[in-house]
Image (cartoon, rainbow, N blue to C red):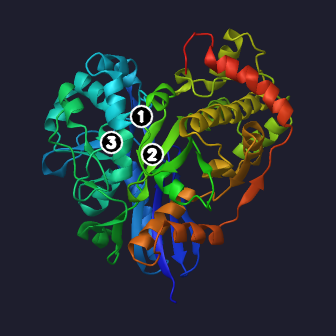
Amino acid sequence: METKKYVAIDLGAESGRGILGEWTGEKILIKELYRFPTYNVSLHSHLYWDVLAIFSEIKKILALAKKEGQISGLGVTTWGVDYGLIGEGDLLLSNPFHYRDKRTDGIPEEVFGIVPKEKIFEETGIQFMPLNTLYQLYATKKEFPYLLNAAKKILFMPDLFTFLLTGKQSAEYTIATTSQMYNSLGEGQQSAPRGNWTYDILEDLQIPLGFLPEVISPGTLIGSISKEIKEELGLSDISVYAVCSHDTASAVVAVPAREGIWAYLSSGTWSLLGIETENPIINEKSFKYNFTNEGGYGGSIRFLKNIMGLWFLQECKRYWEKNGQSFSYGQLTDMASSAQPFFSFINANDDKFLFPGNMPERIQEYCRKTGQRVPEDISQISRVILESLAMEYRYQMERLEDVVGNRIETLHIVGGGSQNKLLSQFGASATRKSVIAGPVEATAAGNLLIQIMASKEISDISQLREVVRKSFPLFVYQPRDTSLWDENYEKYKGLVDGDATGKKT
């Protein structure tokens, strides 16, 4: 058959990519067209996404795609929770706030004073994090109420870029569920696979309801590239699809799993560890362990834990570069491999590491306050990060198995972090699981394959995952030195269960 070409716009918290996918009928062949930083700007006391700069880069991707021939489809994925507000005349009212903006500091506690924490979890099943859309909107209502009053529509980041491309406004199901404003337990809207907005919680918080968009299913054809963009770039019609627009949801679609009991770890700026389930798991244990129930393809649920991930290393790298020491991630990993094992640990899911800043100093201060040896050089700090992440994977895996009542056999690591061989091996050794790493571009692959499935060329998710197994190299890691990892895990667990602040995670 004649090959067809699709484009995935994959925007991560650190970088954006334009990926061309060539569908042969059996395999998807991918090629990176263009990569750029996802621009953010600190202005006065706030941190924003530079949406127009990012959109200009998306147009560069479209111009490059044009040279590849006829494009059959396009889909956009981004990180979760952040949003833009659209006013009268389809005007973007403000640059969207970055989820690491400090305006949400202390906001969850204010919200719980109005709506009990238990009620929010019962209705949404979403992990409590200060960056969730619910708390962002409440913070905006306090500081900039006129923005909410003027808003005609709230669009999450992938929906915002889709709107800029097509002029159509909607909320895709998987991204809407990240907001902690959506109830996946309820009956679905006509166009959504399940659930609806939590109108009662939003009313209690005096957040407007009129700007909530229609929720649509992944795989929905939204429309075509707008007339203005076609004229500007000399493009023919390109169909734009709602894929699983939350990047993790698209990555999970591309997990190359077979039958059996398996978990996934989508590894990048964040590490997201979880399983696929048919229905949300909302009970005493999932509330206690602060797990989350986010939407997946076909109305499935991604029951998972958000772990801070390679953000630690990214932020350290930024700090070192600012001070004249420039290293690639590969170099940092090589340096870590030769550093002393199990030197000290950080609690890899502590909110004190959430915001930008001098990450090496924060890590050193944490070790100092918890009575551990303090890592001084770059190689040792890098190893502390990677080992702590692997220990956190085990910590959350044990909780995951406790909630679902099954022992998980295999851990699939997908996304950019899967190419870090040292972290993948650490993950296998710490969790005592077989680890299958790949594909690296899982989000883009899931994005592209959902477009192909929407075009009726792939029948279901099982066939889609068979395509993934045929299309991408996979690497297997088995546990090593397990007794040593077990011994040191007890130290990590003790640290997390009762760190220097006395706070339970």
C-alpha gap between disc 2 and disc 3: 10 Å
Mark drawn on residue 384: none
Circle 2: residue type:
Trp
Question: Residue sitting at 36 percent across and 44 percent down?
Answer: 177
Residue 45: in sight, yes or no?
A: no
Q: Categorize mark 2 by other alpha carbons within 10 Å: few (<14), some (14-19), many (20+).
A: many
Lateral position of residue 113 relative to residue 395, left or right:
left
Front in this rendered view, residue 424 or 64: 424
Where does the image place residue 465, in percent across and percent down from the top left? 56, 66
Tell me if label 2 and label 1 are in contact, CB under 8 Å: yes
Where does the image place residue 359, in percent across and percent down from the top left? 62, 25
In the picture of the structure, the residue carrying the numbered disc 2 is 79
Circle 1: residue type:
Tyr
In the picture of the structure, the residue carrying the numbered disc 1 is 99
Residue 129: in sight, yes or no?
A: yes
Mark drawn on residue 83: 3
C-alpha gap between disc 2 and disc 1: 10 Å
